[in-house]
Image: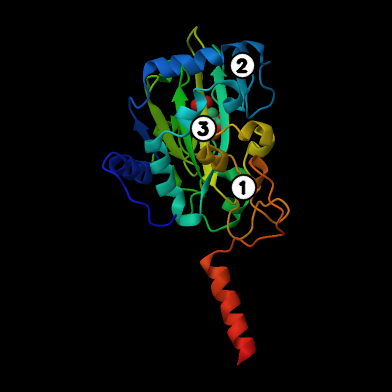
């Protein structure tokens, strides 16, 4: 996936994402679809107890598995412009991306600001490498269901913080918080310092995060448990791949040595089958020719 084409629409967003660590992609989904999704999730928002713990934060409600809860979810998750941007950011470090999580979030009136964090720090490797390493692990996409504004807890972001990974916290005065309308998407890197803001209004801030990660990482939400074969069988092949029914070369994430997508169709009665990258094939050829000489 290393040399992806960059379309006209994606170019400026990619530049902004790389330069400041986030970008706003405005008006890319019709309001009716946001309303359809938000209304399908209404019962879940009402039925889910508030979160527990100093990261998730009291006065917030969160739930995942959004493809199980609304047929509209796939339209957001597979939005072609979003996927193009994400694949361009993550492509240099993997063969294929994967869905890392879908999470609906309500920030209730009176909720305090979340702790600033970088989402990629869930994978300790990002902190084991020198702080100036450039690998990206994840791209986050925040889709508001209600209008977001600084007063109601719009996501706070620290511009340029993806180049300052050694700094766990940065001066709050450097943070920005945008007004975002439903139908638009806020994209930010896993290396960008950010957090949910405090909600000082009387109305809940509702939205959803969809994140994508390098295909060889353990996802935050175990997609293949959330969407077991009985569910994923009804997904399009592309969506099934995105939720993990796909081997990442070399041979990672297999079932019985075969691609997990075989669980979705006719069972094959073959044995283990290699899925190797160029590097492994070159190494094997070098070894074999050395053994022959
Ligand atoms: O709700 C938000 O604006 C951001 C939430 C977030 O960053 C997180 O939960 O990781
Ligand atoms: Fe986050």
Q: Nearer the viewer, residue 79 or 259?
A: 259
Which residue sits at x=58%, y=34%?
A: 101
Tell me where residue 271 sits by quadrant. bottom right
- Rendered view: 249 above or below 187: below
Is label 1 within 8 A of ligand 2 (CB to nearest ligand atom)? no
- Rendered view: 5 above or below 157: below
Q: Position of residue 272 (x, y in %)?
A: 70, 60
Which residue sits at x=64%, y=58%?
A: 251
Say whether residue 241 is visible: yes
Q: Residue furthest bottom?
A: 293
- Describe the element under mark 1 as helix, strand or loop: loop
- CA separation in Å, label 2 and label 3: 21 Å
Which residue sits at x=45%, y=28%?
A: 75
- Who comes first in sequence, dot 1 or dot 3? 1
- Who comes first in sequence, dot 1 or dot 2? 2
Colour mapping used in the image: rainbow
Characterize the local packing of mark 2: few (<14), some (14-19) or many (20 or more) Cα atoms within 10 angstroms: some
- Who comes first in sequence, dot 2 or dot 3? 2
Label 1, on which residue? 123
Tell me where residue 144 sits by quadrant. top left
- Describe the element under mark 2 as helix, strand or loop: loop
Say whether residue 132 is visible: no
**Looking at the rendered structure, which numbered label has been put on residue 59?**
2
- Describe the element under mark 3 as helix, strand or loop: strand
- CA separation in Å, label 1 and label 2: 27 Å
- CA separation in Å, label 1 and label 3: 17 Å
Q: Position of residue 217 (x, y in %)?
A: 60, 49
Which residue sits at x=32%, y=39%?
A: 13
Characterize the local packing of mark 3: few (<14), some (14-19) or many (20 or more) Cα atoms within 10 angstroms: many
**Looking at the rendered structure, which numbered label has been put on residue 210?**
3
Q: Position of residue 52 (x, y in %)?
A: 69, 23
CB-based contact (under 8 Å), mark 1 and mark 2:
no
């Amino acid at each position: 996936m290393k040399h992806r084409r960059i379309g006209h629409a994606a170019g400026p967003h990619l530049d902004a994402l790389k330069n400041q660590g986030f970008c706003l992609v405005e008006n890319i989904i019709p309001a009716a679809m946001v309303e359809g999704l938000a209304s399908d999730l209404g019962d879940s928002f009402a039925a889910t107890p508030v979160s527990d713990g100093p990261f998730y934060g009291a006065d917030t409600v969160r739930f995942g598995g959004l493809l199980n809860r609304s047929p509209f979810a796939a339209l957001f998750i597979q939005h072609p412009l979003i996927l193009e941007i994400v694949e361009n950011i993550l492509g240099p470090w993997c063969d294929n991306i994967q869905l890392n999580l879908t999470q609906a979030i309500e920030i209730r009136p009176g909720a305090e600001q979340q702790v600033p964090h970088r989402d990629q720090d869930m994978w300790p490797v990002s902190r084991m490498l020198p702080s100036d390493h450039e690998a990206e692990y994840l791209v986050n996409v925040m889709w508001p269901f209600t209008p977001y504004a600084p007063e109601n807890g719009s996501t706070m972001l620290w511009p340029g913080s993806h180049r300052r990974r050694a700094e766990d916290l940065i001066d709050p005065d450097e943070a920005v918080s945008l007004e975002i309308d439903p139908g638009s998407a806020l994209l930010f890197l896993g290396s960008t310092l950010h957090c949910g803001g405090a909600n000082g209004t009387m109305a809940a801030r509702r939205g959803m995060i969809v994140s994508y990660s390098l295909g060889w990482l353990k996802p935050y939400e175990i997609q293949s448990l959330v969407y077991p074969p009985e569910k994923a069988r009804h997904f399009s092949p592309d969506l099934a791949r995105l939720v993990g029914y796909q081997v990442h070369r070399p041979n990672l994430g297999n079932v019985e040595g075969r691609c997990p997508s075989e669980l979705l169709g006719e069972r094959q009665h073959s044995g283990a089958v290699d899925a190797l990258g160029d590097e492994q094939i070159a190494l094997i050829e070098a070894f074999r020719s050395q053994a022959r000489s």
